[in-house]
Image (cartoon, rainbow, N blue to C red):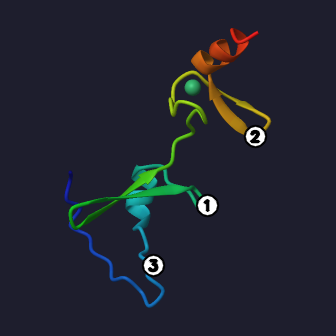
Amino acid sequence: MKKTGVYRRVDELGRIVLPKEIRDALEINIKDPMEIYTDGNSVILKKLEDNCIFCGRTKDITKYKDKIICSKCIQSIMALK
Ligand SMILES: [Zn+2]
């Protein structure tokens, strides 16, 4: 984990502003979904990657009817018939 030297206060609604420099460096854009993890008493924010709705893979993915599916799961589904 890399220390940024930046700190922000949590506002009355529980919000924290991510500094623009960090958003730019990590290519986090307005309305991007962020996944929230905890580790002990740390909070970790991770940009939500598109992943397969069946297995969670993020490689070789395709969007079909607004759902994300990977090539391996497509092959598995095709093998069902
Ligand atoms: Zn899959």
**Distance in Å between CA atoms under marks 2 and 3:** 29 Å
Vertical arrangement, residue 74 with respect to residue 7, above or below = above
User: For the residue marked with disc 3, what is the amino acid?
Assistant: Arg
Q: Earlier in the sequence, mark 3 or mark 1?
A: 3
| In front of the other: 63 or 75 | 75
Which of pointers 2 and 3 lies earlier in the amino acid sequence? 3
Label 1: few (<14), some or many (≥20) within 10 Å? few
Q: How many marks?
A: 3
Q: Is mark 2 within 8 Å of ligand 1?
A: no
Q: What percent of the width, then of the height, locates residue 10?
A: 37, 82
Q: Which mark is residue 31?
A: 1
Q: Which residue is mark 2?
A: 66
Residue nearer the viewer, 39 or 46: 39
In this rendering, the answer to whether 31 lies above or below 79 is: below
Label whose residue precedes the other's in the sequence (2 or 1): 1
Considering depth in this image, is 40 or 48 the residue closer to the camera? 40
Q: Judge by depth and name the residue closer to the eye, 57 or 1.
A: 57
Kindly report the distance in space between the C-alpha atoms of the residues bearing marks 2 and 1: 17 Å
Crowd tier of the residue under label 3, counting other residues whose Cα lies within 10 Å: few below 14, some 14–19, many 20 or above: few
> Residue 4 at x, y = what percent?
24, 61
Residue name at image x 44 percent, y 65 percent? 20
Label 2 Cα neighbours within 10 Å, binned few <14 / some 14-19 / many ≥20: few
Pointer 3 residue: 15
- Kindly report the distance in space between the C-alpha atoms of the residues bearing marks 3 and 1: 15 Å
Q: What is the three-letter code of the residue carrying label 2?
A: Asp
